[in-house]
């Protein structure tokens, strides 16, 4: 994790670096730092514990002016969050680096460098890298060669940006396992972990590939691939509006992103469906060929994206009749699998940079899975570039660490994919048209749920002083309950567990008492009567119920039963609509508890380490 940003310009870069860090805070926010080359030829470094705002305050007091610089926002892996462990790290006072990733052989390198006389001031793996580059610089006398030689000795994942006071005209950067993008300006160039960081200064980007090394100067960018051959990575223009990274009138990014859902669900459908059909070609020119003869789907993802995969499994098996397995990437990558013939490998990731998901994808390709399909929100991300077919969600940048609009757009994209697959497997035109009609209603239905915001805020009060909660659902609503529980625990720090409602009596019912609120999603589907019996079991044990239900489900409010009516929805699209009240519930509980809604403790938006 961690975010890095760098600039080489003719103007002062401290403001550019600081804004870049603010935009990268989703990658980590326990400390931040910056190093710039000052007019007198010396490097000035500033580092602070805490969020980027703390660094900004320090720099406001003692500026960090210069036309070449690098900066970093950290998510601690080696060593606690402290000023000494914060980046940039330096070797002497002429060489500085920032690093995103993990160096696995850092201990042995550290021992060697110590024996060679280098002194360490931090507990980080990064300090090993900076001393190693310094050692190579003394040998080669050229920064680019020093970095090339040093990375040849590293094992692990890294994106690095390096500057040397004796070579004031350039930055040297490289990537292996962690993302890095070059922002192309006029008379100035930039680098960052994510293009979002550089949107205030450019909309033109070059995406470095694994193993690339690059020399970034004011008026040129030279890239070499892993073999040392010059590489042309092409220039891509950014697709979303630059202001999408602003909070606007909303108090938190999370709330803004919840409210954007009608718009982004629509954007994810647009151009991909007619009034009654999915346009298979719009899912990718190769989609038809890829979906033919698929006999099994293997879905891999983490966190919220995994929950999207769980919902998709119900859809794929019900509508396409194709067996589907779903597994979290961190488990999949470390076990032996039986590859069924004609398996389509499907990765879901908002960021496209989640280390476990990428590792699983690479492993699957090496193991001979038929083809890889990605559902992703970030154009140009590693996942997008390494997959055979990509369906982009059109959520726009998601800044809140708790994923909201990414999830509902993933579901939208997955449903379109399911329909395309189902058409190859006997779904009738009439069935397809019925579901497409339901998909077209989604933006309006989500609007209707958003209109219940103040009622949901009232319900949230009951959770303020609770330490535990249960979320129940049946069928495809079970992963919706899981996602609701994940939202509540990550931003309000209330322990929340999700169960398929039928499992309650097999153990968790023992936990139920008046201190254990039980949240349930109850659309009007063929499982609703069974679900109502499960709710009786809870009520009989004194549990307080919070039920989001279709009017036709006839769940009656009463003593200890709070019912919020959700507009009628098609059973297939219900998981998308019923997610929204659970997002709002978590949001309001977190606001009432006064937690850091957009940047909850211990987490980061993009998990680029194992
Ligand atoms: C959920 O709110 C989290 N942000 C987290 O579970 C996230 O979904 C997970 O880390 C996977 O991220 P990805 O979609 O970017 O791969």
Image (cartoon, helix red, strand yellow):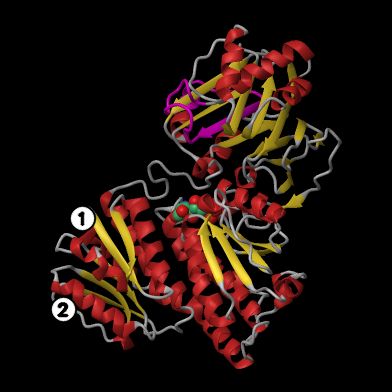
> What segment carries the magenta color?
57-86
Determine the main secondary structure of the stretch shown in magenta.
Answer: loop
Q: Earlier in the sequence, mark 1 or mark 2?
A: 1
Q: Which mark is residue 466?
A: 1
Q: Residues within 10 Å of mark 1 (few under 14, many from 20)?
A: some
Q: Position of residue 184 (x, y in %)?
A: 75, 41
Q: Residue furthest bottom?
A: 430
SS category of the residue bearing label 1: loop
Question: Above or below — where is 16 with respect to 284?
Answer: above
From the viewer's perspective, tell me whether residue 515 is left or right of residue 491. Answer: left
Residue 83 falls inside the magenta stretch: yes
Visible in this render: residue 205? yes
Q: Is mark 1 within 8 Å of ligand 1?
A: no
Q: Position of residue 397 (x, y in %)?
A: 56, 55
Residue that mark 2 sits on: 558
Residue drawn at (77%, 69%), measured in percent from left and top? 286
From the viewer's perspective, tell me whether residue 36 is left or right of residue 307. Answer: right
């Amino acid at each position: 994790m961690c975010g890095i940003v760098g600039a080489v310009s003719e103007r002062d870069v401290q403001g550019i670096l600081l804004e870049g860090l603010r935009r990268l805070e989703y990658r980590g926010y326990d400390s931040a730092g910056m190093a710039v080359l000052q007019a007198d030829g010396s490097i000035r470094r500033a580092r602070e514990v805490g969020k980027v705002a703390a660094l900004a305050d320090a720099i406001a007091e003692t500026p960090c002016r210069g036309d070449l610089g690098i900066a970093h926002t950290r998510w601690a892996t080696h060593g606690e969050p402290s000023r000494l462990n914060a980046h940039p790290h330096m070797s002497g006072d002429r060489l500085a680096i920032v690093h995103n990733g993990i160096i696995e052989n850092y201990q042995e390198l550290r021992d060697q460098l110590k024996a060679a006389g280098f002194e360490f001031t931090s507990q980080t793996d990064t300090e090993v890298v900076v001393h190693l580059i310094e050692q190579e610089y003394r040998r080669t006398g050229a920064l680019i060669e020093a970095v090339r030689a040093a990375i040849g000795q590293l094992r692990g994942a890294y994106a690095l940006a390096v500057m040397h006071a004796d070579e004031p005209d350039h930055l040297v950067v490289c990537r292996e396992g962690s993302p890095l993008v070059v922002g192309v300006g006029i008379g100035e160039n930039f680098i960052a972990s994510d293009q979002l960081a550089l949107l205030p200064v450019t909309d033109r980007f070059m995406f470095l590939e694994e193993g690339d090394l690059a020399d970034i100067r004011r008026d040129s960018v030279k890239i070499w691939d892993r073999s040392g051959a010059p590489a042309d990575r092409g220039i891509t223009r950014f697709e979303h509006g630059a202001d999408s990274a602003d909070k606007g009138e909303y108090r938190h990014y999370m709330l803004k992103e919840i409210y954007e859902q009608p718009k982004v669900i629509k954007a994810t459908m647009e151009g991909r469906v007619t009034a009654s059909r999915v346009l298979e070609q719009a899912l990718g020119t190769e989609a038809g060929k890829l979906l033919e003869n698929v006999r099994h789907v293997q879905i891999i993802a983490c966190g919220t994206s995994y929950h999207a995969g769980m919902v998709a499994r119900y859809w794929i098996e019900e509508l396409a009749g194709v067996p589907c397995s779903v597994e979290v990437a961190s488990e999949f990558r470390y076990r032996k699998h039986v590859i069924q013939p004609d398996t389509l490998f499907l990765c879901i990731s908002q960021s496209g940079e989640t280390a476990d998901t990428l590792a699983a994808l690479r492993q699957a390709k090496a193991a001979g899975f038929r083809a890889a399909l990605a559902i992703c929100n970030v154009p140009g991300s590693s996942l997008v570039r390494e997959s055979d077919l990509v369906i982009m969600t059109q959520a726009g940048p998601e800044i809140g660490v708790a994923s909201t609009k990414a999830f509902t757009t993933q579901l939208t994209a997955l449903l379109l994919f399911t329909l395309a697959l189902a058409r190859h497997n006997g779904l009738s035109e009439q069935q397809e048209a019925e579901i497409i009609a339901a998909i077209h209603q989604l933006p309006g239905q989500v609007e209707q749920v958003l209109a219940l915001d103040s009622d949901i805020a009232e319900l949230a009060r009951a959770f303020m002083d609770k330490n535990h909660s249960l979320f129940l659902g049946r069928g495809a609503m079970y992963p919706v309950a899981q996602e609701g529980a994940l939202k509540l625990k990550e931003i309000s720090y209330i322990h929340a567990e999700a169960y398929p409602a039928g499992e309650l009596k097999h153990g968790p019912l023992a936990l139920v008492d008046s201190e254990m609120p039980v949240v349930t999603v109850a659309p009007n589907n063929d499982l609703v009567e069974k679900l109502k019996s499960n709710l009786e079991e809870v009520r009989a044990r004194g549990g307080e119920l919070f039920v989001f239900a279709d009017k036709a489900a006839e769940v009656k409010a009463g003593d200890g039963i709070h019912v919020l009516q959700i507009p009628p929805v098609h059973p297939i699209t219900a998981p998308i609509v019923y997610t929204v009240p659970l997002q709002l519930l978590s949001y309001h509980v977190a606001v009432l508890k006064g937690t850091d809604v957009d940047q909850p403790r211990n987490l980061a938006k993009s998990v680029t380490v194992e």
